[in-house]
């Protein structure tokens, strides 16, 4: 029987080139330059994303690497990969290369990604916006 995740996940994925990452103390923040949404990733999620930051990675290779890092829950990792696919953080690509060496020294927990409520253009206002009164 094919699980829902197996039917949704592409076989091999890579990070979309329009994403910019900033490493923070407990993970990373991704900015999607197309949608202007920020995504906060915990330390485990950031480690997973780094696996396909510079190359394509197969889902099976990612699951195996997560197990080496201490994951005991393939379903949680698959759900995270599915979320990355649904949010269009990753895209399907051809055959994967060998995984890069990504150091992960923290304690493994389920990977979590949270998208900010509004895109950047709804948060940041322009100093030249005529609807904003000038300071006197």
Image (spheres, rainbow, N blue to C red):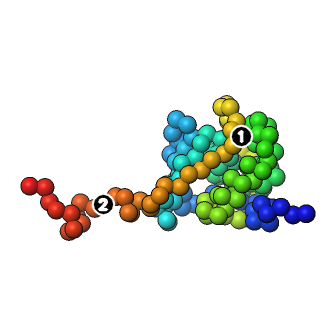
Name the residue rendered at 68%, 38% in the picture. 109
Q: Using the image as rendered, state which of residue 55 and residue 5 is in the foreground.
A: 5
On the rendered structure, is 89 left or right of 130? right
Most extreme residue toward the left is 136
The vertical placement of 101 against 77, above or below, is: above
- Which residue is under mark 2? 125
Quarter where residue 134 is shown:
bottom left
Category of crowding for the residue at label 1, using alpha-carbon neighbours closer than 10 angstroms: few (below 14), some (14–19), many (at least 20): few
Residue at x 78%, y 50% (from the top left corner): 75
Image-based side of 33 in relation to 112, left or right: left
Mark 2 or mark 1, which is nearer to you?
2
Q: Residue furthest bottom?
A: 130
**Mark 1 residue element:** loop
Residue 101 is tagged as: 1
Q: Are marks 2 and 1 in contact (CB under 8 Å)?
A: no
Residue nearer the viewer, 115 or 46: 115
Residue at the image position 69 percent from the left and 43 percent from the top:
110
Q: Quadrant of the N terminus?
A: bottom right
In the image, residue 91 sits, relative to residue 72, either above or below, namely below
């Amino acid at each position: 029987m094919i699980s829902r995740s197996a039917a949704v996940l592409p076989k091999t994925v890579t990070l979309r080139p329009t994403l910019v990452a900033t490493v923070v103390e407990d993970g990373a923040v991704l900015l999607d330059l197309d949608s202007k949404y920020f995504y906060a990733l915990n330390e485990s999620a950031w480690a997973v994303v780094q696996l396909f930051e510079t190359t394509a990675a197969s889902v099976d290779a990612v699951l195996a690497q997560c197990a080496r890092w201490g994951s005991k829950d393939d379903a949680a990792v698959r759900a995270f990969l599915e979320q990355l696919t649904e949010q269009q953080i990753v895209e399907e690509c051809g055959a994967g290369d060998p995984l890069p060496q990504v150091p992960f020294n923290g304690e493994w927990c389920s990977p979590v990604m949270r998208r900010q409520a509004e895109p950047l253009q709804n948060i940041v206002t322009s100093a030249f916006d005529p609807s904003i009164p000038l300071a006197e």
